[in-house]
Structure formats: structure tokens, C-alpha cells
Image (cartoon, helix red, strand yellow):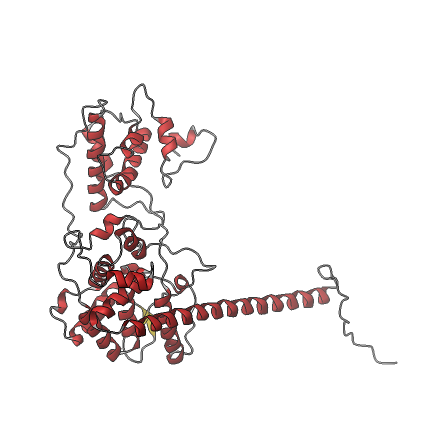
Amino acid sequence: MDETDATRTPGPRRGPGRPPSLAEIRRSIKATTQPESLAAFMECASYRPETVRSYSQDVRHWIDYARKQGVDLLNPSDHDVAHFVNVWHTTGPDGTRPRPSVAVRRNRRKALNAYSRHLVKAGASRGYPLANLRVEKDKTRRKASPRTLTPEEIHAFLEAARRMNTPAYFTARMLCDLGPRTWEMEAARRSSIHPTNRPPIIRLGGQGRGAVSDRELGPITVHTWHEYEDWLRYTNPSTPRRLSDPLLMVPHQRFDPPSPLNARRLERLVDRIAVRAGLSDPETISPRTFRQAWIRHGLAVFHLTDVADAVGHLSPSSTLRYSTAGTVPVSPHAGRVRAAVGGSVARGVLLLRAMEGGEPQPALMEKLTLQEEAARLRSDEHLLRELEAARAETEALRRRIDAYETRSGTYRFTQQTPPPVDTETPPAA
């Protein structure tokens, strides 16, 4: 128990996992000693909206840290700034308190630098001591590869995966058709393909670990997954499949039971398929390559915000990291693709690849429509089967209650007459 727990004011609890809201920050900052810094900082026109949005969380954490530690927000010491940037950490979704990663530390330094410049411009401070603050270089962040897979290379990759086996073909379809994140390939659950009456999908990796994902697997992948589930049920009839199981279950060898797909197995599978497809430089192809190709093909037709929403990014700046120079040339088929698919980015990417590869447009549109309709029907059948199972379980439980009450002689929970009890009649003397 710390000082804040001992002298807690009545009201909602303020734990380490809940950052202060903007209204709380505005109420806590006094105009006499401190400016309404965060409100003015967020409304400052010299920063782009996505930059302000990404910095505001770190600035909120800094104000909360300064309030709890008794640090002067206008003139902090170099030790306080260094401790906040390099040492201070929030509680993770699993209850752990890990040391902040290099990316988090660099973002905090950028946010405090922008916040300090804002205070200096407002005349409220002489600036934060950031000159001697050092954060090591992030060696894990990879730059966007200049190579983008062409429709011919993607078609060759899918054909090579189809010749290998069904799990490899399904994995290749997931990579090529939807541009999934790494966690969606490794740890997405079967429940994520049924958006109705299911818990929300949780991001398991990245800086937003533990947050709710804003994208659900599309109907095109659902149709492919239903085909894969039929094959998996046919080849492994005795293996139960629960909704909490991973979505991708790939056997190690030909006759092995299916097991979850991790990052290393996914990398090796992509390398094997790329070699069989005869692609140039197969060692440079990774699951991230297909995600980048999907995003760049989407940017060639749709607006940046539409592609960011379709791929599941919280900010358009994250989507721009997958493009080499930040801009993608508009495809000559962009108008026809948008008119044919409307606002569906997933269908637009498939249609653009088919048109650039020479596949006739009407045949592809009819195939996509049939696949989505089949996926919708299969989803309805799945919900009906669950409803029937729940009804059967309820009926069995009601029968058990009736039998128990009949044996105990109490019949309080039903309005019907109790069934006759078989009693053995004593033999006549």
C-alpha cells in the first residue's frame, strides 16, 4: 500500500492501467502555475493529427507520472525525464510490468521533445533537459522492403502451395487474400471468424498488446476456412475442435495430427513454398512481404484511410510504413475496381490482381459473390447447430432436476403433477 492508497479520495479508482482522461487533466492543471498544456498541445495546428494522437498518450502518461512523483511539469530535472523515458513502465494486460521497449522509449522521447517545444512556444517553460538523454537504436524495427510481389508471383505462390497440401494452400490463401498480421496467422482463434455472439478479438502483439482489434476476418477467408475445416474434420475425425483452439492447425508431417502454427514454422513454410514456386530471391520473402503487397495493392485503388481500416491499423501512419516512399502510383484499373466492389478493400485487392493478371472480371466477381454467400450460409448453420445443442443440454438438465426432485419427494420447481413413484409392494403373508 502506497501513499495514494492510504489517502484515497472517494470516487472511481485510478489504477496504473487507467490513464487520466483529458477532462481530468484539464481540471488538474491550474492556469496560475501551469498552462492548459495538453489541451493546447492537442489542438496545436503545427502537428499532424496522427502525430498528435500518437504523442498524446505518452504526454498523458508523463503528466500522470509527474503528478504521482511530485515532479514539476514546467522545470523537471534531467533525472526525472530520463527515469520516465527509460525506466517507468505501465502494467501490461497480463499483470506483468516489463521494461519499456526501445520503440516505446523512443516514442516517449519524441513526445516529450514536442511537448517541451510547445511549452517554450507558449512562454511557460525554458524547455526540458533532453540534450543528454540517449536512447539506443531500435534494431528490431524493419524498414519497408522495396520489392512488391506482382500478381504473377502471387499466383505462382498459390499454385505451388496448392500442389504441396491443403494446409499449406490454406495458409497461402490467408497470407495472400487478407494481408493478416503475424498474430492472426499464429494465435487467432476459431471464434474470430464468427463475429456474432463472440467475444472481441484481442491483439496479442505489438505496442497495442491487449487492446481490442478493430478488424474481423472477412467472408472470403471464412469461405476458405470452411473448406479447410471440412478437410480437417475428414482427415482427423477423432480430434475435437473448440472455439478457443487456434484458427490454423497444420501437421508437422504428412500423417501427424494437426498442431498450432508458430512464427518459425510459418517462416519455414513460406520459404518452402517460395522455392517451389520458383520466385526470385526466395530468402527475402516472408509473411510480412505478403502483408506489404496487400497494402500496396490496396493503396493503388483505395484511399489511405480505407486501407488502414481494412487492414486493422489504428493510425494511417502505420499503413504508410509498408510503402517504400510513402506514396503508391494509382492503378489504371482503379476506377473499374471501385465501381465493381464498392467499399470492400479485400475484394478490390483480389479483383485488381486478377485484372492485372489477365483473369476475366465477370467470372471473378461471380466467384467472390458465391463464396461470400456460401460463407454466410455456413455461419447461419453453425449458429443453428449451437442453438440445438444448447436446447438439448437444457432439456437434459431439466430431466435431471425432475428425477432428483422425484427421488427426494420435493416437487417445488414445476407446476405439473409429479410422476408416479414405483414402490415395491410387500408380498402377501
In the rendered image, the vertical position of residue 57 relative to residue 163, given as above or below: above
In terms of image quadrants, where is residue 147? Answer: bottom left
Question: In the displayed structure, would residue 58 be above or below residue 365?
Answer: above
Q: Foreground: 225 or 7?
A: 225
Between 163 and 329, the one nearer to me in the picture: 329
The image shows residue 112 at horizontal and vertical percentages of 22, 34
| Residue at the limit of the structure toward the left, as seen here | 281
Residue lying at the far top of the rendered structure: 32
Residue 20 x, y percent position in the rendering? 36, 35
Residue drawn at (14%, 58%) of the image? 145
- Residue 386 appears anywhere in the view: yes
Q: Nearer the viewer, residue 12 or 300?
A: 300
Q: Foreground: 178 or 13?
A: 178
Instruction: Indicate the quadrant containing the N terminus: top left, top right, bottom left or bottom right.
Output: top left
Q: Is residue 215 left or right of residue 378?
A: left
The quarter of the picture where the C terminus appears is: bottom right
Q: Is residue 186 visible?
A: no
- Asked whether, in this view, residue 209 is left or right of residue 388, the answer is left
- Horizontal side of residue 143 vs 70, given as left or right: left
User: For residue 83, which quarter of the picture?
Assistant: top left
Q: Which residue is found at the position 33% from the left and 25% from the top? A: 29
Residue 298 placement (x, y as % from top left): 25, 59
